[in-house]
Amino acid sequence: MSWLLIILQAMQAAPTPPTLDLATLEAQTLARHPAIRRAAADVEAARSRAAQKGAWPNPVVGGSTEELRPRESPSGYFGGFIQQTIPLGGTLGASRAVGERELAVAEAALATTRQQIVADVRDRYYRVLVAEERRTVAAHLSELASESAVIAKQLFNVGIADQPDVLTSEAEAAQARAVLVSVNALRLAAWQRLAAATADPSLVPQKLAGSISDALPTLDRDATLTRVLAENASLQEAARGADTARASVNLEKRVTRPDLYLRFDGGANREISDGRAIGPQFGLEAGISVPLFNRNHGGIASATSRVLSADATVDDMRLDLTGRFAEVFAQYDGARAMVDAYRVEILPRVERAYALQLAKYREMAAAYPAVLLAQRMVFQMNDQYLDAIERAWMASNALRSALAIR
């Protein structure tokens, strides 16, 4: 007895496992997901490239000699030079602008990845909630079917029910148990998909915060469409790509602008003049490149075409988002109406009808086929209700995530 008391006290003292909520899962996923790390590394690479763009060309340093002679009759020249190219026409600034736009694209890609991952986690989270509810409902329906089978057998034992009624009720109970096994398997699969979405293979089934029975969010069509188009990160990423293409056109127009070339020479001339060496000598050369043969018409035309392509991509994505929005919002609107109807009108009625038929059957006031029909209606309506509520939540989450689900 003392050991039993110790076990009971240990069970009572054991801490209750914490409830896992969606916000915690999202934060943990953003901190550890490999896709986030990859996109963040791409941002740092783009930042380094942007810092490098617009750097000045390196100078050229060298030496030169002319007509060197032995010491007995010293003569000739030896010295050095430094040469520097100075880009003109804003080429360096245009190059830096391209680098900054490319960095903005990489940052937008990171934002896209974050948005998609959060949307995936939210989608998988609610699918798990639906799977948990399906298991609860399947277990309840299995109990109802088993209860009907027990009642039919009891009535058969007292000579009131027929054997076909017993056999049919037992078959229905066996089918309900098989459905429960299938629902449990689907529940485990939903948990595994959630673990993959959160990049946490160790995630195991546990209590989740929230319920699919919570009130569905009310979404306004026009306001939601405006928000989807404004917040969809993939669309913003495409717009940043178009900005980069425009910056590239400006750079292509400037690459043939004249560059200034400077060369400074200095050295010692040992040539004898008026009885002594000439000595130190210095010189300066300057020149510019002339865009005579290459004016980069092909590069400019190519960059301009890329701008047209990038702008068309943005417009195409906006149209695609609008079309997807229409489909998803219709799914949300229709499923939400069905959920309300099932909750308020359909489920209470079919469950009440089943209870009444079962009571009548016990009193021999109704035949078993009527009980069976009512029971099947309960099963069917609950299954359709879960399908509707799953569609409603998935569509709602997709809309609130700016249609970012991968």
Image: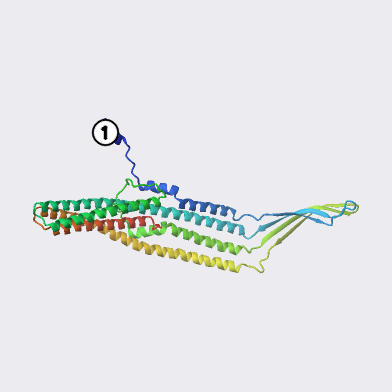
On the image, the x and y values in percent for residue 209 come to 32, 46
Q: Amino acid at mark 1?
A: Leu
The image quarter containing residue 394 is: bottom left
How many callouts does the rendering have? 1
The answer to whether residue 203 is above or below residue 247 is above
The image quarter containing residue 376 is: bottom left
Residue beneath disc 1? 4
The answer to whether residue 229 is above or below residue 147 is below
Does residue 262 appear left or right of residue 314 in this picture?
right
- The single residue placed furthest to the top in the displayed view is 2
| Residue at screen point 43% across, 63% down | 317
Q: Quadrant of the C terminus?
A: bottom left
Q: Quadrant of the N terminus?
A: top left
| Residue at screen point 49% across, 59% down | 240
On the image, the x and y values in percent for residue 399 come to 36, 57
- Can residue 343 be seen from the camera position used here? no
Q: Nearer the viewer, residue 112 or 170?
A: 170
* Disc 1 secondary structure class: helix
User: How would you rate the neighbour count of disc 1 (Cα within 10 Å): few for under 14, some for 14-19, many for 20 or more?
Assistant: few
| Residue at screen point 50% across, 67% down | 308
On the image, the x and y values in percent for residue 108 come to 47, 55
On the image, the x and y values in percent for residue 187 come to 32, 52
Q: Nearer the viewer, residue 316 or 390?
A: 390
- Can residue 335 be seen from the camera position used here? yes
The image quarter containing residue 340 is: bottom left
The answer to whether residue 249 is above or below residue 10 is below
Q: Nearer the viewer, residue 5 or 301?
A: 5
Does residue 156 appear left or right of residue 63 in this picture?
left
Does residue 393 appear left or right of residue 349 in this picture?
right
